Amino acid sequence: MTRNVIPLHIEVINGPNMNLLGEREPELYGTMTLTALEAYLRALGNELDATVDCFQSNHEGALIDRLHQTRRTADGYIFNPAGYTHSSVALRDAVLAVAKPVVEVHLSNPDAREPFRRQSFLADVALGRVNGFGAVGYGLALRGLVHHLRGHAAGR
Amino acid sequence: MTRNVIPLHIEVINGPNMNLLGEREPELYGTMTLTALEAYLRALGNELDATVDCFQSNHEGALIDRLHQTRRTADGYIFNPAGYTHSSVALRDAVLAVAKPVVEVHLSNPDAREPFRRQSFLADVALGRVNGFGAVGYGLALRGLVHHLRGHAAGR
Amino acid sequence: MTRNVIPLHIEVINGPNMNLLGEREPELYGTMTLTALEAYLRALGNELDATVDCFQSNHEGALIDRLHQTRRTADGYIFNPAGYTHSSVALRDAVLAVAKPVVEVHLSNPDAREPFRRQSFLADVALGRVNGFGAVGYGLALRGLVHHLRGHAAGR
Amino acid sequence: MTRNVIPLHIEVINGPNMNLLGEREPELYGTMTLTALEAYLRALGNELDATVDCFQSNHEGALIDRLHQTRRTADGYIFNPAGYTHSSVALRDAVLAVAKPVVEVHLSNPDAREPFRRQSFLADVALGRVNGFGAVGYGLALRGLVHHLRGHAAGR
Amino acid sequence: MTRNVIPLHIEVINGPNMNLLGEREPELYGTMTLTALEAYLRALGNELDATVDCFQSNHEGALIDRLHQTRRTADGYIFNPAGYTHSSVALRDAVLAVAKPVVEVHLSNPDAREPFRRQSFLADVALGRVNGFGAVGYGLALRGLVHHLRGHAAGR
Amino acid sequence: MTRNVIPLHIEVINGPNMNLLGEREPELYGTMTLTALEAYLRALGNELDATVDCFQSNHEGALIDRLHQTRRTADGYIFNPAGYTHSSVALRDAVLAVAKPVVEVHLSNPDAREPFRRQSFLADVALGRVNGFGAVGYGLALRGLVHHLRGHAAGR
Amino acid sequence: MTRNVIPLHIEVINGPNMNLLGEREPELYGTMTLTALEAYLRALGNELDATVDCFQSNHEGALIDRLHQTRRTADGYIFNPAGYTHSSVALRDAVLAVAKPVVEVHLSNPDAREPFRRQSFLADVALGRVNGFGAVGYGLALRGLVHHLRGHAAGR
Amino acid sequence: MTRNVIPLHIEVINGPNMNLLGEREPELYGTMTLTALEAYLRALGNELDATVDCFQSNHEGALIDRLHQTRRTADGYIFNPAGYTHSSVALRDAVLAVAKPVVEVHLSNPDAREPFRRQSFLADVALGRVNGFGAVGYGLALRGLVHHLRGHAAGR
Amino acid sequence: MTRNVIPLHIEVINGPNMNLLGEREPELYGTMTLTALEAYLRALGNELDATVDCFQSNHEGALIDRLHQTRRTADGYIFNPAGYTHSSVALRDAVLAVAKPVVEVHLSNPDAREPFRRQSFLADVALGRVNGFGAVGYGLALRGLVHHLRGHAAGR
Amino acid sequence: MTRNVIPLHIEVINGPNMNLLGEREPELYGTMTLTALEAYLRALGNELDATVDCFQSNHEGALIDRLHQTRRTADGYIFNPAGYTHSSVALRDAVLAVAKPVVEVHLSNPDAREPFRRQSFLADVALGRVNGFGAVGYGLALRGLVHHLRGHAAGR
Amino acid sequence: MTRNVIPLHIEVINGPNMNLLGEREPELYGTMTLTALEAYLRALGNELDATVDCFQSNHEGALIDRLHQTRRTADGYIFNPAGYTHSSVALRDAVLAVAKPVVEVHLSNPDAREPFRRQSFLADVALGRVNGFGAVGYGLALRGLVHHLRGHAAGR
Amino acid sequence: MTRNVIPLHIEVINGPNMNLLGEREPELYGTMTLTALEAYLRALGNELDATVDCFQSNHEGALIDRLHQTRRTADGYIFNPAGYTHSSVALRDAVLAVAKPVVEVHLSNPDAREPFRRQSFLADVALGRVNGFGAVGYGLALRGLVHHLRGHAAGR
């Protein structure tokens, strides 16, 4: 691919229990493992002239640390805070602190589950949200984030 | 494009005030007109081996009629109910009645606006949601819906 | 039938998505079509010395118009506002404006579904309600309304 | 009456203060006494090839006992829990325990009275509801229940 | 009238059931018909050097269409959304889209009626509100809107 | 002015912080002082054959006292309770006690401000409300009140 | 006592757990037994030319039965529904059915206890309430009820 | 009266609009004037060996001042805060500060009026409450308070 | 069993619908009958040097009576109030009145059922709670209660 | 003290019941009197090159008047609205009107008391808040306010 | 012990602040240390033919990690999430992910403490709950869990 | 400094994102870095004869650990839980467990931000709170805490 574009760096951050992806409740979350998901995103990033680094932790504090540590090198974030979505003001504050565009992704459709999953402490400070497409949703988020960062017109 | 895929038909439905796209509150909704958005989606559909038909109305009843009339020919829907998102049980029932996958799209990020925009009568019966990417979000939704309908693995 | 009773005229009005009756979610709404339901009600009306006219629309405004246009000729209404039950103050106001007895009917049992279906903007201004009997409920409502209008003692 | 139908047995159960029917707040509940109502229902049952037994108590426990004692002989119930409608989980549990179809009936229109009358602990576990038709509503409920139990098509 | 003022054009839009004005619940809404109200407003407009056009519909979508179609020619709006006041985000969005001053008028006093009439989706995006003066309130709104548009000091 | 009308007496009462009108948050409340507003209202009253007396206090009790003291001489009131609007049952009771028509006026649009400003303890016992027109709103309220008291048809 | 007054008959009804009065939580409810309380009320009744009958039950249904059975002979009721105060719509309905003045009495101050004790299903249909005076409160209630029934001016 | 009892001093405090007693909404509050009520209470106090002083103000601050000024001489208070009942934390704090028994009295039955009258900031810090007996209720409260202060057994 | 312990007496009380245990909704409540459950508990009591008496009623009042009648002989209670758990302040008051340790038991997991089952009027005045273990939970509760009453260290 | 700083003038305003400081509920509010507190603040002000004037009233209106009268001479305010904190929109509006920095102080910790003390109508328009330090908190507030007004770096 | 049973492995997990057991608020949590509790559980496990491993952490992420790491070897869990009970959706998701029976245990009775302790994000996905028995509750939970896993009839 | 005072040891604990102080949203949080803040507090402590140790972590568990580890050596705490303020029951429990005075500090004014920032799980178990003074607030908190621990009279 020889398009002459400014390269971007995107951080993909996954929250608690995402390490069990592919094994945990597959009827809800699908069968692709986290390793495969991350490989797919790096490949898609390559195609879009964006480097992609991935991180997962079950620790809220480690997710905050990661946001802090990458805040100077990342052009944007794809972030699935999983269970912390609904309870963590600290992660919201970290997103505000890094001051880079963040796309919130959820594998499943949180609006179709327990009522407490309808509240997200991230949604209103995120650039946008992609819910319900399973692993594909990360790819859509990556495309959308790259478009946003390059200021492209809609379309390819 | 010579890939050997089963062709799909997607209906794109836009709700009230979307006819003013590009003119109405451009700082919130962007400058692309509805005509341009629809052309972009038909072109992207072409690239993805999917025909795309588009419809817009300010009338809740006309949106319901459209869902009914296209329910046998459409393989899936991209639907931005706009202001009706937050009040219309009738549209929710129509989506349940057509029994086809529906992706809910919003140009802006409803979670970052007035509190009443946090409730969607569509979200929990939709396949998924794409919020906050402006016109680009329709393209992401179209890609995601086509992937879902073809049962593709993640990625292209 | 030769009973010597004052003839009555009843309007039956069905709201959004009722045109798909018999086809839409049959496990919830049954398999009788709207055409068959309307024929059944006209026949039952005949038996009860009441003429019955039927109307269906997916348009809130058209339902209001119908209430207005028939307000001088109808002695009472059987009204299933479907999805508009839970959101329409305008229909409530139309019912108040026509000032004739209205029986609210629902095919399914709204109390056994999503919480937002527990609110009806019609229930407290209606004469009564019949829920959960499927198409039979319209017949019960028609019998009840005719009894009410003739001021009969209970029973036939 | 010579129709060849399987006979049914229906229990009619009335809750607290219903023994004062005809005397208590007649502008709200009508002038028919409970004795007359029960006679009317037995007669209508006869016409519909259904035996009807009636029971009334002001005691929540006695209503539960009655449901238990008749659970093997009754094909279905017509139940007006009156004031217990809005507070009794125990009666709800009894209805679940007997596992027979129950139609909830109210003489007046609870939605048009105090807000706490809008909550029914029975409504979502009942087959259906008939509200607001006074004593006539019991007859409608009986017809509807018999239809349901015989699996009739709508109409007679 | 020979004052040398810039002429204005005002659109008066009335929502559902307003076509029955003068006939519907006159103890609440008064006996002046809609035709007479509109004539009065055109005459008052003439006196204030403002042309006045009037529109009424029971269809939410038609009200949105009207706002769109007149958005370039109207200097301001007098809008009584009637029952849609309390449920329509779509009309709110239309008002935001036309970006002209809108005065919300109600014949009766919504605060003195059912609790759900206390919520208006229009009130916080309107220039102001006039409630409870019956038909006279439209005249007050017209005077107030004309003053606002001409930037007059208070008083005539 | 020689029209032959029964003269009226109107009390204008302004609540807390209104003495700073013209100086306090002028972008919200405008630049006209309270003295000028009162002069304008007296002049307008003169034109409408109504005497106008004005009163302002920051003391809730003094506002109640004023209502009491003028209850025999006033034909009606124009009342802006300002901050007490949202908290004072005592003022509501005073308005009920004087038993004269009261028009509630607000300079700004309370619905467009903090959520607690949406509750008015006066609104449902007032004749009507005029919000959002700044000082002009008092003039509109005066016209509307005079019309109401004289039982005029709409118009001048 | 030789005053020439029409004799009255008052029913005193005590609800659940009141049989343990004097023994149960004496720091909250005092040390006077129910027997002594009833003797005191009969004596005070005698002094006021009123006969007093007393009843206590832990059974909600028995309390309803008692209200029904005494409704023709009682001129008024003093009623402490104890724990049923906060949950029983059936008792409220019984009070409405007997259509005689009822004074609600509580030994302790329900407003100073758990939040759920602030709701009374009786309070708004009672003539009045006396809370927090322990056994003395019954005497105050009896005096007040007798005054009310005799239409006395305030005072003895 | 020669009983050998320790004399008591009771302060009776009436809040806003109580000065209009007998004139204001007599169907709700009765026809006895405040002057007559105070005379009645002084007479009843005399009979009970208690001096009674009375105070009324429409000013929340004056009511607080009165509580402060009398806190050393009063043995207890009868307090009807009227409209301030539902909004005044400051009066609650004053009652806590004076640390004497206070009986809350209301002429009408606040539980039978608007929902906001169900909240009392005084009720849970008062000794007790007497509602709904009109002017008689003050007499009952005075008797109850005197009994409480003298630690009498129930009865006379 | 020759351990030298002070014998205890435990009352086991089961509320409404528990008489149908083993027959009613066995997938939820299991197949052991109430008779068998009571036998098991008496046997386990024997093993633990505790006599066990059992009682069941569908009548709220009878449950209160039972608590009262056994309050001097019981050392503690195992109480499953079933449906009354969520509505009965009277039972709560009875538990407070008997002033003995009470363990609340539920066969199923109320937190996993309808939202109204999350409120228990007993939980905060009970010693503890055992939910979700079916009939075994009564045995656990009995062990726990006996330990508590004997003040044992944890373990056997 | 010879530092060369611009002198400041601070108004200290105390709300209802603060005149009883040192006497009222000393376990909650401490034993220092208001006179001593004001002397301490004037002395501390002297040390910080700030003149301090103090005012206390139980009258909401007098507190508003004081804010108005001092708005040109005060550089900032230390304000303990006491009980009015939780109910007074009028005081909030006065604070907005004077447009000077205000520090809210509470002697006790309102968050540790009744739930209604958690709402402050002042907190979000104040510069900051100091709660729970008793009289010392005023000194901290004064230091903090002076620092703020002088734009000092943190520390002395 | 020679019973021929399939051995089980149980994980006991304790959440934040449980390391201070025996020292922290002993009147609420008892004086047994965590070390002693764990020894007791291992011994009881031995008696029940179950191995027991114990883990405690103050880190939410570490608790999630522990659930993940033991999910293949544990037959069931005894889990006291302590303070995370009321806020952690991530722990709930981890429990769902490991898909093994989990018994929730609390030393104290959360229903008898602050209102926010009534919500548990674990309760509805747990097998059951044991509250309020102090350290003994863990033993009861272990017995109950072992019974459940072995499918025993009730009792030993 | 030669004052003869008992030395104190104070722990200062800062929660998530506080490591970015001075860099993160400086318009909200100021430009002083965490290092500088901690130096300032140690210096101020020195002046007040108190040693000050500081700790910051983004990990909720680490904050709990720190509270535990220092609980024997610290005389009091200054604690800014940042985002965990609004969600962490575990931190609240840790504060209760250490049983030392804790002052809650916030740089900004949480009451002036998003509604969810109004809830603090720490506020009601803290000694006091200092909000809105930026870094200076820590100094005020330190002074206040030292005063409290030494039991000084107000002032220096």
Image: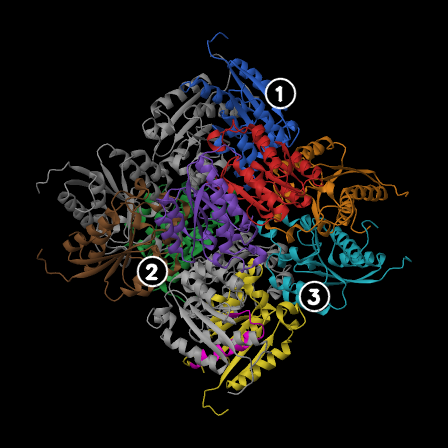
Chain colours: B yellow, D green, E cyan, F orange, H blue, J red, K brown, L purple
Answer with left or right where residue D99 lies relative to residue D130.
left
The region drawn magenta spans: B129-150
Q: Secondary structure at mark 2?
A: helix
Q: Position of residue B59 (x, y in %)?
A: 61, 69
Q: Amino acid at mark 3?
A: Val
Q: Secondary structure at mark 3?
A: helix
Residue K62 disc label: 2
Tell me how far mark 2 sits from mark 1, CA to CA: 75 Å
- Most extreme residue toward the bottom is B2
- Residue behind mark 1: H36
- Is residue K119 visible in this depiction of the protein? no
- Most extreme residue toward the front is L2
Residue E98 disc label: 3
Residue D77 within the magenta-colored segment of the rendering: no
Q: Quadrant of the C terminus of chain H?
A: top left
Name the quadrant containing residue K76. Answer: bottom left
- Is residue K41 visible in this depiction of the protein? yes
Residue K79 disc label: none
